[in-house]
Image: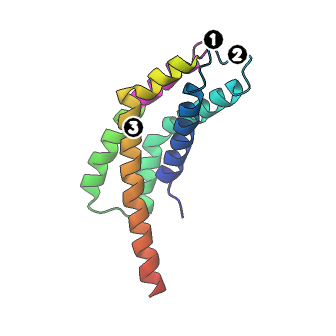
């Protein structure tokens, strides 16, 4: 079963994959472009996921009974900080009247977004490995 963090990671990853594609298309604006509304939808969903990241971390820590808790709490504090920075980047992009492929390319290159993605991929990998071990234990 997916945790809140894993769902958040999935939303952010889908957004990132879409924005990579959009950046490669060379659009001068998202206005009048078929993928323009989709771009804004993906970014909006990602921003919403990031708004709830702190609660998602707390929920996952409790629901999954993550141990050692102190190390997970410290890591989640880093993840939350990086999420706030990445959210500010995405919200700035969303606030623009026209979003070009170049703007999205620059957003994707942002160290803040890259740090967040790395944070999310790391915790997702840890959680998936824990879930696989638990499933193996139940199966035996």
- Determine the CA span between mark 3 and mark 1: 25 Å
Residue 98, image x, y percentages: 62, 13
Q: Nearer the viewer, residue 64 or 99?
A: 99
Image quadrant holding the N terminus, namely: bottom right
Mark nearer the N terminus (1 vs 2): 2
Q: Residue at x 46, y 82 (%)?
A: 138
Q: Nearer the viewer, residue 77 or 115?
A: 115
Residue 101, image x, y percentages: 56, 20
Task: Look at the numbered disc 3 and give the secondary structure of its residue.
Answer: helix
Q: Residue at x 41, y 35 (%)?
A: 83
Place residue 85 in its image quadrant.
Answer: top left
The stretch in magenta equals 84-99
Image quadrant holding the C terminus, namely: bottom left
Task: Look at the numbered disc 2 and give the secondary structure of its residue.
Answer: loop
Find disc 2 in the rendering and name its residue.
31
State the scheme by which the image is colored. rainbow
Residue 119, image x, y percentages: 36, 44
As drawn, the label of residue 97 is 1
Magenta stretch secondary structure, dominant: helix
Find disc 3 in the rendering and name its residue.
116
Mark nearer the N terminus (3 vs 2): 2
Mark nearer the N terminus (3 vs 1): 1
Crowdedness near tag 3: few (<14), some (14–19) or many (≥20) residues, C-alpha within 10 Å:
many
Crowdedness near tag 1: few (<14), some (14–19) or many (≥20) residues, C-alpha within 10 Å:
few
Up the image or down, 85 lies above or below 96; here it is below
- Are the two marked residues, 1 and 2, in contact with CB atoms closer than 8 angstroms? yes
Can you name the residue that lies furthest to the bottom here? 140
Task: Look at the numbered disc 1 and give the secondary structure of its residue.
Answer: loop
- Determine the CA span between mark 1 and mark 2: 8 Å
Front label number (1 vs 2): 2
Crowdedness near tag 2: few (<14), some (14–19) or many (≥20) residues, C-alpha within 10 Å:
some
């Amino acid at each position: 079963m997916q945790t809140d963090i894993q769902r958040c990671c999935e939303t952010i990853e889908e957004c990132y994959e879409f924005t990579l594609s959009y950046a490669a298309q060379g659009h001068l604006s998202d206005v009048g472009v078929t993928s323009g509304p989709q771009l804004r939808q993906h970014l909006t969903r990602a921003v919403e996921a990031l708004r709830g990241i702190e609660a998602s971390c707390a929920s996952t820590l409790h629901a999954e009974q993550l141990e050692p808790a102190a190390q997970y709490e410290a890591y989640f504090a880093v993840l939350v900080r990086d999420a706030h920075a990445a959210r500010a980047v995405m919200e700035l992009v969303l606030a623009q009247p026209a979003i070009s492929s170049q703007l999205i390319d620059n957003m994707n290159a942002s160290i803040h977004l890259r740090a967040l993605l790395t944070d999310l991929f790391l915790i997702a990998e840890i959680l998936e490995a824990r879930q696989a071990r638990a499933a193996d234990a139940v199966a035996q």
